[in-house]
């Protein structure tokens, strides 16, 4: 099963600048003044009922977080560039988010689990290989006698199996120990080995490793390998090994010298002495779209020339097409194949090899993260066009059927399930924001009533029916507030056409819209110079 959604779009709970009702270029003094003004409205102690206190506490917490982020130059810069996601990168290192206890606990457990998985993956680096060899020659070879009456039942034979696993354990920043084990059986004969490798890094020149292999077939083997960087473009490595078998002690040496010829081309020379003595020269060119390799080996008993190429597709599926031709003393082998990514961590591949005297072989491979599953199948002892056609077409048709009937429906259902979960999360978030908005309106109504009562007590029967109603966005954009007439008892807000409204600019820079009927009152207050005509544009 695939992992759940790793990144989900978070429903925005309001821009911090809009929440504090300030412009994005607001100074620290303006931020502080706006924060103090809103705290006077939404402080829980200003409200009597338990429900209003709860809503006021939630709003007060949001205001506090917004002010905490915008008042710090570092977090404000991060917020201006990356938004709220930038504040939550890698957990809570930048700013601690204010959440409910359940949300904090859930996120902490999720972060802890992901961190432990990453640490375990990095520290152990497990790798595994499973191989299952099949003999399918009965499906294609004919066993008719001279009269055509003798028939043989076709059967599939498992002639080889192998399992290998390896892990790593870092002892320090420079030392790493690796443990690998393998078991195999072929035609009724089994064997296995256990390998222990200790590697030490030397930052000044390279690394060295010592290995010990214990097996029931070849006997114990002790080896030492040294890798040294000669320059930024050249390196050399040598490995010496001693095999203790029933026939005596048998040493072996392998030396490799490599040099980067161009940014995408590398050449190497390999010399082997011991059980297999040979001299090998290769040149490799690797780019984003292609991989080419030419290898020439002279040795006893095997000498060959190998030319291989690989096309790397840049599509989403990471399709790769491979082909190679090997000509040597043991015959000629032509191999071609393809591999494609079927999910985020899985890659499926198939290759066909044909040659003399090897016959026709089909190899299926599935890579899942660091695990590899391989099925090599021997189809025919001789090269036959019909067998080659079956080996080429059958895996292709099987993949198309698997992709259309299994993979694509599964991916679609998983995507639909993720979209459904996102919609449910968004729906619950939107409902929560709606309830918060309604609670904010109720909280502001209490403040409105108190201000209206105060004005009525000061001015008699004709109160000044003006108040800060709600923030909205100006097209420039500017963050300001509407001031409108409303009836102090019904709390109704009759619409005022923009053509009949004026802007009142306060020293803080926040504009307020007013009705022309109030101009004489404002003139009497001596602030007529701050009144400007309304510009004809929608808000």
Image: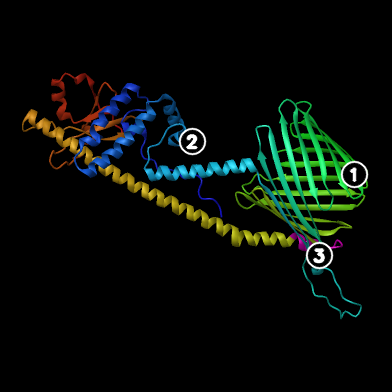
What percent of the width, then of the height, locates residue 98? 37, 37
The main secondary structure of the magenta stretch is helix
254 left or right of 390 in image? right
Q: Earlier in the sequence, mark 1 or mark 3?
A: 1
For label 3, the residue is: 386
471 or 360: nearer the viewer = 360
Asked whether the beta carbons under mark 2 and mark 1 sit within 8 Å of each other, the answer is: no
Q: Residues within 10 Å of mark 3 (few under 14, many from 20)?
A: few
Q: Earlier in the sequence, mark 2 or mark 1?
A: 2
Q: Residue at x 18, y 38 (%)?
A: 446
User: Against 177, is 218 above or below?
Assistant: below
User: Comparing marks 2 and 1, which lies closer to the viewer?
Assistant: 1
Boundaries of the magenta span? 380-392
Asked whether the beta carbons under mark 1 and mark 3 sit within 8 Å of each other, the answer is: no
What percent of the width, then of the height, locates residue 368? 65, 51
| Picture quarter with the C terminus | top left
What percent of the width, then of the height, locates residue 307? 83, 45
3D distance between C-alphas at marks 2 and 3: 58 Å
3D distance between C-alphas at marks 1 and 3: 49 Å
For label 1, the residue is: 249
For label 2, the residue is: 89
14 or 106: nearer the viewer = 106
């Amino acid at each position: 099963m695939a992992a759940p959604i790793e990144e989900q779009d978070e429903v925005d709970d309001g821009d911090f600048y809009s929440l504090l009702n300030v412009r994005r270029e607001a100074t620290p003094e303006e931020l502080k003044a706006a924060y103090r003004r809103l705290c006077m409205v939404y402080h829980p102690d200003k409200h009597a009922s338990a429900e209003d206190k709860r809503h006021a506490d939630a709003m007060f917490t949001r205001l506090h977080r917004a002010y905490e982020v915008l008042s710090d130059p570092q977090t404000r810069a991060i917020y201006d560039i990356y938004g709220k996601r930038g504040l939550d990168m890698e957990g809570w290192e930048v700013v601690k988010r204010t959440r409910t206890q359940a949300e904090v606990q859930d996120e902490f457990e999720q972060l802890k689990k992901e961190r432990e998985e990453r640490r375990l993956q990095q520290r152990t680096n497990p790798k595994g290989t499973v191989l299952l060899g099949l003999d399918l020659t009965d499906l294609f070879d004919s066993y008719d006698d001279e009269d055509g009456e003798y028939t043989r039942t076709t059967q599939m034979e498992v002639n080889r199996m192998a399992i290998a696993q390896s892990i790593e354990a870092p002892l320090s920043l420079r030392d790493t120990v690796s443990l690998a084990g393998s078991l195999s059986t072929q035609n009724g004969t089994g064997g296995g080995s256990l390998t222990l490798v200790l590697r030490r890094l030397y930052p000044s020149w390279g690394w060295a490793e010592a290995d010990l292999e214990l097996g029931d077939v070849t006997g114990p083997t002790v080896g030492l390998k040294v890798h040294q960087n000669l320059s930024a473009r050249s390196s050399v490595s040598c490995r010496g090994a001693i095999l203790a078998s029933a026939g005596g002690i048998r040493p072996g040496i392998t030396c490799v010298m490599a040099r980067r010829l161009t940014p995408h081309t590398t050449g190497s020379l390999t010399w082997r002495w011991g059980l297999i003595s040979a001299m090998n020269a290769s040149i490799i060119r690797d780019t984003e779209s292609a991989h080419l390799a030419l290898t020439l080996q002279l040795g006893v008993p095997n000498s060959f020339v190998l030319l291989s190429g690989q096309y790397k597709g840049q599509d989403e599926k990471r399709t790769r097409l491979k082909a190679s031709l090997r000509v040597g003393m043991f015959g000629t082998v032509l191999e071609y194949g393809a591999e494609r990514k079927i999910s985020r961590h899985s890659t499926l591949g198939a290759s066909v090899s044909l040659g003399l005297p090897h016959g026709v072989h089909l190899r299926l491979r599935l890579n899942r993260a660091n695990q590899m599953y391989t099925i090599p199948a021997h189809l025919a002892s001789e090269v036959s066009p019909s067998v080659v056609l079956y080996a080429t077409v059958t895996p292709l048709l099987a993949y198309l059927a698997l992709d259309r009937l299994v993979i694509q429906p599964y991916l679609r259902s998983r995507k639909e399930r993720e979209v459904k979960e996102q919609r449910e999360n968004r729906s619950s978030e939107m409902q929560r924001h709606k309830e918060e908005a309604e609670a904010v309106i109720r909280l502001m109504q209490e403040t409105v009533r108190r201000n209206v009562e105060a004005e009525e007590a000061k001015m008699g029967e004709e109160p000044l029916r003006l108040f800060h109603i709600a923030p909205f966005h100006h097209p420039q954009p500017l963050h300001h507030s509407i001031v409108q007439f409303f009836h102090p008892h019904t709390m109704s807000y009759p619409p005022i056409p923009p053509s009949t409204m004026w802007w009142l600019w306060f020293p803080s820079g926040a504009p307020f819209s007013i009705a022309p009927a109030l101009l004489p009152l404002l003139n009497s207050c001596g602030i007529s110079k701050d009144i400007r005509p309304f510009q004809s544009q929608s808000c």
